[in-house]
């Protein structure tokens, strides 16, 4: 079969057309398909309604080489994707004994026998389908031939969908090389865009995209004919130009880079948090194996705890306030002493919406870094709401740890 | 005209089908339409391609009472929404002199005469259209009659789209009542679905949807003709049947409910975390004003810190291991002592992927609760990967705090 060249994405779920959830699957799948040269011509969200889904699958099946469907593969009565796809394709559905036996342990957890029985609907497979075994969750993916090409059925939760999509696309790579992704912190989206554009000039065989999340910017190069070697070369040239702001070119997160650098340098790490409330340690411990270098931390939300747990001198709090150079340094030094860590970071700031003042507006955040060579502090002013100030603060704290560690 | 009862949302932009942007307009518009009783039957994203957009508008115009289109109303050559809509509806386009005169200042800013001329494309109005003047930006909205109802053309940038959508919907409120949402923790999606279904029976004037996130399930009831009073009554009946598992019916998150209950009871709260690494305190401090009841917490990732910071007896760690009833209780009691909090929760578990054993597999998590009446512990076994075990652990810790507090 000729590989598909155009595609539709169909996302299934009443929550999507009621505005109860933002559909992020479409964007993620579209990016993945684009990267291997498949052009998405439409993306449609439909409710958990069998007739409506059947109509869309019939329409898209006649119009496109590939249809990627997410959602509606779970166990409950409103999971109708299997039935709709079978009807649109004119094939039957058969319960797969191997999949059913794999679901027995899950079914056994339900007290209600009807709920237990429903679990096995996830073993129902369209006749002739290739099964993509679930990597996370319990719903497998299914690939079914159509007159024009294929339908790929994937579960809706992004974490379950992602590995199955990758499995499906693995065989199709090589059409174009994988995109090169530079992850950066501490420089603005526009700065990074300019720097990358300067390196690329007006070449049109590499497509540049800059994607920004709070405090974390990705410079993405898509292969539009340049080939893997030229893409890698361009990526390296941009990384060199961007300098220390680029923290990874191999997909690692900022927390992973911090832990890898600490591990390589045999440096143990601790945290002292106020306005981030534990999210810096939360980000570090998200990485498997964090325990080899991360010892722990303190969340000292009140002034009292800053003093009793971290030993911050009450006169510093009184004179300079909790959000200050002096207190950030004392918190970092204090948690380093308490935990015995080699390197400690502290965060104390005003996340809002209340608590701001003329000289310390909402978004003012002080960071302390304490290591064997001493203690220092840095201040940032972030814009945005409470959530965004906290997110940026987490990224900045991790980035300060990274820059305080010996480079690779 | 009878108010529209069903609708399609069409979002226009090549970036949407390439995965270069996440479409948030659909979710926002769908929520706004649902709130006034308009049922969105599909939401489709299409590239900046006139033929494709014309085809979708023709198809949707025949199928739905209302089509809301966002994007493609700007000045450049790839803004094709006006032309596509005119073609689909079989009407002409005329430049509106009032709009054109309002664009003169904008046009004058362009040095290039071709760019200046393009600006005036935003004054091109479909024949018979009602114009919604731009509140932000320069592209106005347009409302055009179709055989079945109306097409509403809106600009793509959310800030420009939002006020025009509000203008359009202002006259339509009151048709259907707001959905009722029950947020639940500690019961499975299927169990809650069954309970709600049992209460609703086979009535078709209320639509049931169950949305699940790790450890957090929402039971949503949509008004399909029942009316606000009957919807509220059904919600209350389901809440009663579900019992303590339902933690809010007013949109509050679990962390918000915990903080509100603690505030009402004048109870201060602290946390001691191992496998969740600070995410429980992170969730509590996400809520503005958390500082009135949340004092702080300890992230004791190593055994040493459990002893030095929380005073956990080393013999407990040696005899029972860090993931145990005894250590969970000692951590909760310890952080309660250290912080002086009235109520403390602890979490110690094996998030994986490593560290599991036959009697303590990955996903085994112990929770401790220490209050004025003493200390107790509970164990859970979660399935899923590290991220999901941690998410479920956070929800469970918050839920244990909630159940330990005096009810409202």
Image (tube, coloured by chain):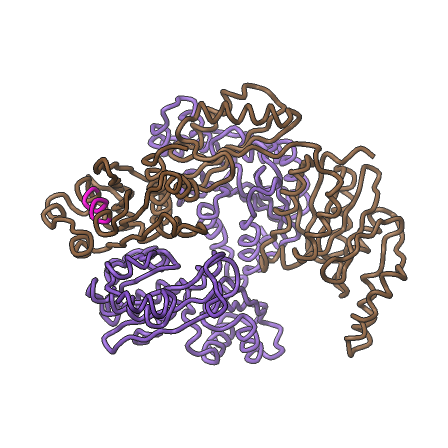
Chain colours: A purple, B brown
Instruction: Name the quadrant of the C terminus of chain B.
Output: top left
Q: Is residue B397 above or below residue A302?
A: above
Where in the figure is residue B347, as x and y percent of width and height? Answer: 27, 45
User: Residue, x 83% and y 70% (percent of image)?
Assistant: B104
User: Residue, x 48% and y 54% (percent of image)?
Assistant: A171
Given residues A227 and B43, the one toward you in this image is B43
Instruction: Name the quadrant of the N terminus of chain B.
Output: top right
Where in the figure is residue B235, as x and y percent of width and height? Answer: 53, 27
Given residues A38 and B220, the one toward you in this image is B220
Report whether residue A383 is seen: yes
Where in the figure is residue A406, as x and y percent of width and height? Answer: 30, 76
Quadrant of the rendered image containing residue A267: bottom left
What secondary structure is the magenta-colored segment mainly? helix
Quadrant of the rendered image containing residue B9: top right
Quadrant of the rendered image containing residue B226: top right
Residue B143 relative to residue A245: left or right: right
Q: Which residues are magenta?
A: B329-335
Residue B6 relative to residue A86: left or right: right
User: Residue, x 30% and y 55% (percent of image)?
Assistant: A288
User: Residue, x 21% and y 44% (percent of image)?
Assistant: B333
Report whether residue B41 is seen: no
Q: Is residue A319 above or below residue B306?
A: below
């Amino acid at each position: 079969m000729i590989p598909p060249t155009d595609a539709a994405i169909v996302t299934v779920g009443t929550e999507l057309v009621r505005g109860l959830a933002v559909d992020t699957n479409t964007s993620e799948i579209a990016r993945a398909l684009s990267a291997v040269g498949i052009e998405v011509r439409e993306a449609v969200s439909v409710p958990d309604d069998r007739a409506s889904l059947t109509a869309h699958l019939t329409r898209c099946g006649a119009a496109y080489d590939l249809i990627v469907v997410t959602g509606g593969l779970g166990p409950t009565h409103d999971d109708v994707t299997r039935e709709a796809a079978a009807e649109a394709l004119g094939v039957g559905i058969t319960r797969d004994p191997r999949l059913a036996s794999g679901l027995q342990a899950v079914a056994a957890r339900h007290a209600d026998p009807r709920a237990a029985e429903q679990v096995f609907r996830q073993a129902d497979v369209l006749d002739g389908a290739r099964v993509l075994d679930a990597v996370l969750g319990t719903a497998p993916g299914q690939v079914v031939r159509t007159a024009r090409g294929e339908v790929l059925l994937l579960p809706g939760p992004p974490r379950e969908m992602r590995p199955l999509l990758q499995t499906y696309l693995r065989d199709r790579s090589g059409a174009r090389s994988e995109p090169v992704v530079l992850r950066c912190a501490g420089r603005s989206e526009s700065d990074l865009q300019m720097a990358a554009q300067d390196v690329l000039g007006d070449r049109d065989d590499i497509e540049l995209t800059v994607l920004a999340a709070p405090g974390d910017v990705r410079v993405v190069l898509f292969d539009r004919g340049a080939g893997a070697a030229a893409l890698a070369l361009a990526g390296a040239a941009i990384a060199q130009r961007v300098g220390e702001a680029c923290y990874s070119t191999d997909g690692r997160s900022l927390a992973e880079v911090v832990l890898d650098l600490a591990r390589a340098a045999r440096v143990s790490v601790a945290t002292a948090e106020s306005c981030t409330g534990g999210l810096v340690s939360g980000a570090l411990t998200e990485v498997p194996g964090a325990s080899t270098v991360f010892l722990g931390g303190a969340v000292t939300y009140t002034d009292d705890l800053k003093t009793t747990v971290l030993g911050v001198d009450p006169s510093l709090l009184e004179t300079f306030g909790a959000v200050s150079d002096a207190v950030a340094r004392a918190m970092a030094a204090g948690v380093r002493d308490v935990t015995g860590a080699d390197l400690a970071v502290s965060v104390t700031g005003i996340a809002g919406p209340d608590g701001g003042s003329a000289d310390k507006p909402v978004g003012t955040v002080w960071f302390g870094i304490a290591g064997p060579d001493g203690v220092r502090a840095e201040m940032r002013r972030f814009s945005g709401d409470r959530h965004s100030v906290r997110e940026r603060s987490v990224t900045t704290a991790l980035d300060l740890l990274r820059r305080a560690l010996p480079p690779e």
